[in-house]
Amino acid sequence: MDAVLKVLLDLLAQFGIGFDQFLNFAVGLLAIPLITWLKARYGLIDRAAAFLTAGVAVVLSLVALFLYGRVGLAEFTLGNFAAVFGVVYATARLVYEKIVQPKPVS
């Protein structure tokens, strides 16, 4: 497992991507199926769906911060959270709107 992680980190480093950035993007991608399922389960659309997306991004951002050790109970900062939330939320919204549910071209 350590060898796989080292290869992944080396590969990311070649492209100038840190593990934190990769993890944020990956969490954003993982948010899409969860958000889609929750929207379908509860029949959410428009504004309610946008709030759901933001809520899921908040939860997953906190999980990501804890995963790479950026946050302990005493180390939580609004700056850390805002940076991760921005990437997670933007990734989830962008991928969902452009790939998962493309709008028809008129």
Image: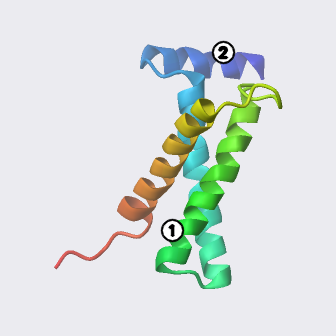
Mark found first going from the N terminus, 2 or 1: 2
Question: Tag 1: residue type?
Answer: Ala
Q: Percent position (x, y) of residue 1?
A: 78, 23
Secondary structure type for disc 1: helix
Apparent side of residue 102 relative to residue 10 in the rendered image (left or right): left
Q: Categorize mark 1 by other alpha carbons within 10 Å: few (<14), some (14-19), many (20+).
A: some
Tell which residue pokes out farthest to the left in this image.
106
Q: Percent position (x, y) of residue 4?
A: 69, 22
Q: Which mark is residue 42?
A: none
Query: Could you tell me which quadrant the C terminus lies in?
Result: bottom left
Answer above or below: position of 55 versus 20: below
Answer above or below: position of 86 versus 2: below
Q: Identify the residue at image location x=75%, y=33%.
A: 67
* Number of dots carrying numbers: 2
Q: Percent position (x, y) of residue 28?
A: 56, 48
User: Of the residues tagged 2 and 1, which is closer to the observer?
Assistant: 1
Q: Percent position (x, y) of residue 75?
A: 76, 25
Q: Identify the residue at image location x=56%, y=39%.
A: 82
The residue that disc 2 covers is 6
Q: Categorize mark 2 by other alpha carbons within 10 Å: few (<14), some (14-19), many (20+).
A: few
Answer above or below: position of 65 versus 90: above
Q: Identify the residue at image location x=43%, y=17%.
A: 16
The residue that disc 1 covers is 50
Name the quadrant containing residue 84: top right
Q: Nearer the viewer, residue 68 or 83?
A: 83
Apparent side of residue 67 relative to residue 92 in the rendered image (left or right): right
Name the quadrant containing residue 34: bottom right
Q: Nearer the viewer, residue 48 or 93?
A: 48
Secondary structure type for disc 2: helix
Question: Tag 2: residue type?
Answer: Lys
